[in-house]
Amino acid sequence: MKRQADSAESKAGGRSIAAASTNVVWHHASVTRARREAMNGHAGCVIWFTGLSGSGKSTLAHALEEELHRMGCRTYVLDGDNVRHGLCGDLGFSDAERQENIRRIGEVAKLFMEAGIIVLTAFISPYRADRQRVRGLMGHGELLEVYCACPLAVCEQRDVKGLYKKARLGEVKNFTGITAPYEAPEKPELTIDTTHDLVGCVKQIIELLRQRGKIPDAPER
Ligand SMILES: Nc1ncnc2c1ncn2[C@@H]1O[C@H](COP(=O)(O)OP(=O)(O)OP(=O)(O)O)[C@@H](O)[C@H]1O
Ligand SMILES: [Mg+2]
């Protein structure tokens, strides 16, 4: 069966992107997603963390992964800085490059999800339109957007990477929350107050995954 990529243009979440690859035909795997998910004992999905720098996306994603791993789930974290070392190492922080960064991550997250994995992504992803585009790549209910809500003042006080200080001094350009905008989600699947205890935050997401039928009520492995 052919996919849209064999036309001159393909659609990504309603946005047309130039498709440089023509005459490519999708090959269907015999080991299907359903078989992978049955083997794993849970569904593949994407948990998309968004929020200011220092709001706790990485901390929460890795703490959640620890808990899911302990429960026997297959997981993988795609984290901002790590991805920018390789896959997106050629991209800077202009609006266009941030958009391309998120597009690539969305496509990678989708591949992992189709492999039956619970993907946790930890990117500021400041623009609603970019996040919406990623949502558009996935099927209904496959992406769970988790907004790490934390006041700018708290993030700046944490200043985990020392970047807020540099941004205030003008040494880092286009810094989200200071010299670049952050557009909070309007309808995230979950908003988490990350000024509260981490364990409680993890529990809220585990509960969300259960409610949405992504993981069983009492996973045994
Ligand atoms: N409930 C919480 N959830 C997450 N992080 C918390 C929480 N409470 C306190 N923290 C602290 O907040 C900081 C969050 O830093 P973290 O690197 O996870 O942010 P980030 O959103 O990934 O930032 P960046 O976009 O710069 O990568 C950590 O020092 C963490 O220990
Ligand atoms: Mg991080």
Image (cartoon, rainbow, N blue to C red):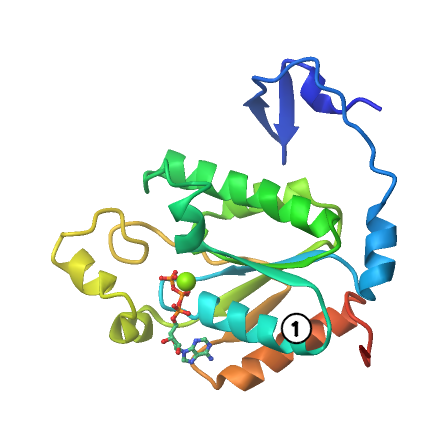
As drawn, 148 above or below 93:
below
Q: Which residue is mark 1?
A: 69
Q: Tell me the amino acid under the disc marked 1.
A: His
Residue 58 in the image, given as x and y percentages of width and height: 46, 66
Q: Is residue 164 left or right of residue 91?
A: left
Residue 109 in the image, given as x and y percentages of width and height: 61, 48
Residue 36 in the image, given as x and y percentages of width and height: 82, 54
Where disc 1 sits, the SS reads helix
Question: Where, quadrant-wise, is the C terminus in this rendering?
Answer: bottom right
- Classify residue 98 by image quadrant: top left
- Classify residue 1 by image quadrant: top right
- Classify residue 94 by image quadrant: top left
Residue 147 in the image, given as x and y percentages of width and height: 52, 65
Q: Residue at x 65, y 14 (%)?
A: 22
Q: Residue at x 36, y 72 (%)?
A: 151
Q: Quadrant of ligand 1?
A: bottom left
Of residues 60 and 147, the one drawn nearer to the viewer in this rendering? 60
Q: How many marks?
A: 1
Q: Residue at x 70, y 77 (%)?
A: 207
Dot 1: few (<14), some (14–19), or many (≥20) neighbours within 10 Å? few
Of residues 4 and 151, the one drawn nearer to the viewer in this rendering? 4
